[in-house]
Image (cartoon, helix red, strand yellow):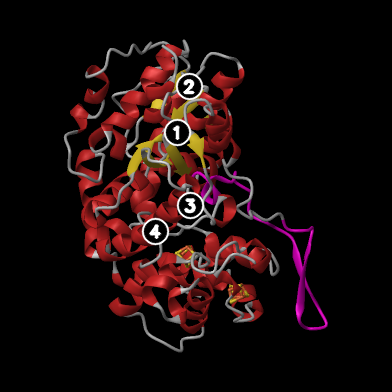
Amino acid sequence: MEESKKLLDKHTDEYWRCARCSLCKWPPLAQIKSAEFSSVCCSMDYGYFHPWSGGGKIVVGASLYYDRVEVTETMRDSVLQCTLCGACDTSCKYSADLEVLDTIFDVRQYIVERIGPHPSHKKYADAAEKYNNPYSEPHENRQDWINKTGAKSNPNSKTLFFTGCTASYRQQDMAQASVEILNAIDYEFQVSKDEICCGSPIYRSGQVEPSKKYIQSNIELFNRLGIEEVITACPGCYAMFVAEYPHRLDEAHIKMWKKIKFHHMVEVIEDAIRKKKIQFEEAEKKPIITYHDPCHLGRGAEPYVSEWKGTKKKVYNQITVYDPPKIYRRGTKGVYDAPREIFKRMNKAIDFVEMFRINEYAYCCGSGGGVKAAFPEMAMFTVKNRLEEAEFVLKKALKERDTEKFIVSACPFCKTNFEDGISDTGKDLQYRDINQLVLELMKK
Ligand code: SF4
Ligand code: SF4
């Protein structure tokens, strides 16, 4: 079997066990809270044709595996019009235990290896090769953002604040708010001039081989600096660290990876609130907020599970039984509670209302998986859907009261896409990054 086809060979169970039931297009029925906001797959909503769904991409994989179709650019782009948000995987596993997201990812990699990446994704990879970031920004300016704050870092700290490319060059205010919070709670950290792209934009666009050097280099950097904890405000980086890095590291690097604890800023803030290091002001006129779960802080941040090895047995020539039993990532063990705990403790400063699609059934903002770069119209289409939902719940909760309305999230990609969506639609609500909101409302 040719090497790249092994990617497809891993998923014969999915090809044969997928019931074509389409449950991956929605949250499980018992979890649906609104008829209007009930879909969970932004790819399907955009493409509006079965191959765009999770189950549809399994059929694409089967068709390629059994040589029924040829790879084309149209096929590649349909498969890339998916944010890898993982909602299909979580919905399917509610009843069927298929590895939908893994299949989608491997089909993506297979197609990209056959005919090359999307031109926008190639541009990102080429830029990262040259500048260590996909935005073609000078590497030496990577940590300039910290000099624009009064924040202090300690070069000897065992904790590294990993900025990530987007917060370093495009959304610096979130990184600045994060380190100001760390200073305020006396949490020592360092930043490193040798930090490079975490690899996510390259990896997730199907360019897995070229992404490996970023994965390895960052782990070697952490090891060289004696880092025991890495904190980041970027879910893209965070999900890479906790869930994807170990898949792509050799034994020696896995040993280095195992020595490090990875945390997203919301976990650090929640912990500081519990220890009473952060308290919030009372507000005279409380704004009302709702929270968008970033896919890579939720489903995508569920910790790594090592690849299953064992014997597969067929029962009644239909049911597959795994011996030893297989451990699944279901998207339910991501970071869902920490941001909500933060909002609970802010209750004298804000009113909080949930959207319909939350936690492991959250709808994507439309920005991830390389979609914003290659298919900006899909990113805009998706974020408008999510903004409609936010606007609906905020207005309903407000009744006649007049106050500021915020959609809050914890991700630089969500920030960019929500800000673009709000500006495009002129909707009467604002975006706030959770770090900026905490910094604004905490007692100084
Ligand atoms: S992937 Fe799962 S939920 Fe989707 S059609 Fe197949 S069996 Fe049904
Ligand atoms: S990963 Fe997300 S966007 Fe892609 S098919 Fe699954 S639900 Fe749809």
Amino acid type, label 2? Ile
The local secondary structure at tag 2 comes to: loop
Q: Residue at x 52, y 25 (%)?
A: 348
Question: Is the Cβ of the residue at disc 2 closer than 8 Å to that at disc 3?
Answer: no
Residue farthest to the right, as pictured: 316
Label ID, residue 227: 2
Q: Give whichever of 225, 391 is nearer the camera.
A: 391
Mark 1, Cα crowd under 10 Å, few <14 / some 14-19 / many 20+, is many
Amino acid type, label 1? Ile
In the rendered structure, which segment of residues is drawn in magenta? 297-326
Tell whether 372 sits left or right of 84: left
Q: Which residue is mark 4?
A: 388
**Whole-percent x, y for residue 279 in the image:** 51, 17
Q: Tag 3 or tag 2, which sits nearer the N-term? A: 2
Could you tell me how far apart the alpha carbons at marks 1 and 2 are, in whole angstroms? 10 Å
Q: Which residue is mark 3?
A: 396
Q: Residue at x 64, y 74 (%)?
A: 13
Could you tell me how far apart the alpha carbons at marks 2 and 3 are, in whole angstroms? 47 Å
Residue 324, by quadrant, is bottom right
Q: Tag 2 or tag 1, which sits nearer the N-term? A: 1
The local secondary structure at tag 4 comes to: helix
| Residue 306 to residue 217: above or below | below
| Residue 156 to residue 201: above or below | above
**Whole-percent x, y for residue 146 in the image:** 27, 21
